[in-house]
Image (cartoon, rainbow, N blue to C red):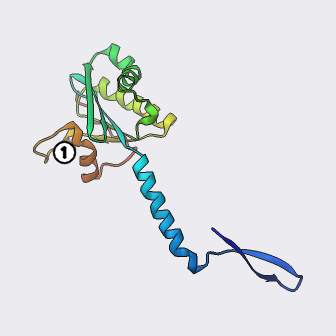
Amino acid sequence: ILIFVDGYLFSLNLWYIKESTPLSFEKYLLLFSSELELVIKHICKMKKLIIDAAKDKIFFMIINNDINYNISHENTKINFEKMITLINEFLNSKNLKIDDISKIYINRGPGSFAGIRNSLSTIKAIHLVKKIDYYCYSLDDFSSVKKFKYENIPNLCDKFKIKKNLINPIYIS
């Protein structure tokens, strides 16, 4: 942004400075900003983490552009207590860190009370510390989808307008 002196302030011979952009420079600034946006989009690669602990297995999936990685663990009390460790081990095995994740998708149920509670509290803690947005989905949200695949969850959350950073768990007794 260019700053030009625009005139005097009253009659005291004091200059006042007004921030303005000449119209002749506007086209160059627009061109530059669009090029900058293109570069940023090219550099920022989205890595998404999907977590489902509502079933009989704790399931993790990383979506890294066109490559997907997944792993599952037994749905046990011991694994609930070390869920953040399991997530970090999974990310480390793919040469990633939690800071590399741009969005987290987590199953809010229906399913195992302990699995949902522990996974939601872990993700909420990650969100508070790292400011990573999360989306709480339910498989019931996607009941109209004929061929459900975990790698489609980010697109399905967009399609069904799942709200960001909202927790609304569904437990079964």
Picture layout, residue 99 above or below residue 39: above
| Residue 64 falls in image quadrant | top left
In this view, the residue in front, 143 or 19, is 19
Q: Residue furthest left?
A: 146
Q: Residue furthest bottom?
A: 11
Q: How many numbered badges does the structure rendering display?
A: 1
Q: Secondary structure at mark 1?
A: helix
Amino acid of disc 1: Phe
Determine whether, in the image, residue 49 is placed left or right of residue 109.
right
In this view, the residue in front, 25 or 158, is 25
The residue tagged 1 is 142
| Residue 146 falls in image quadrant | top left
Residue at image coords 78%, 76%: 16
Q: Residue furthest right?
A: 12
Determine whether, in the image, residue 21 is placed left or right of residue 161.
right
Task: Assess disc 1: are there few (<14), some (14-19) or many (≥20) residues with their C-alpha within 10 Å of its C-alpha.
Answer: some
Percent across and percent down for residue 105 are 32, 38
Residue at image coords 75%, 74%: 17
Percent across and percent down for residue 103 are 38, 41
Residue at image coords 25%, 42%: 153
Quarter of the image for the C terminus: give it: top left
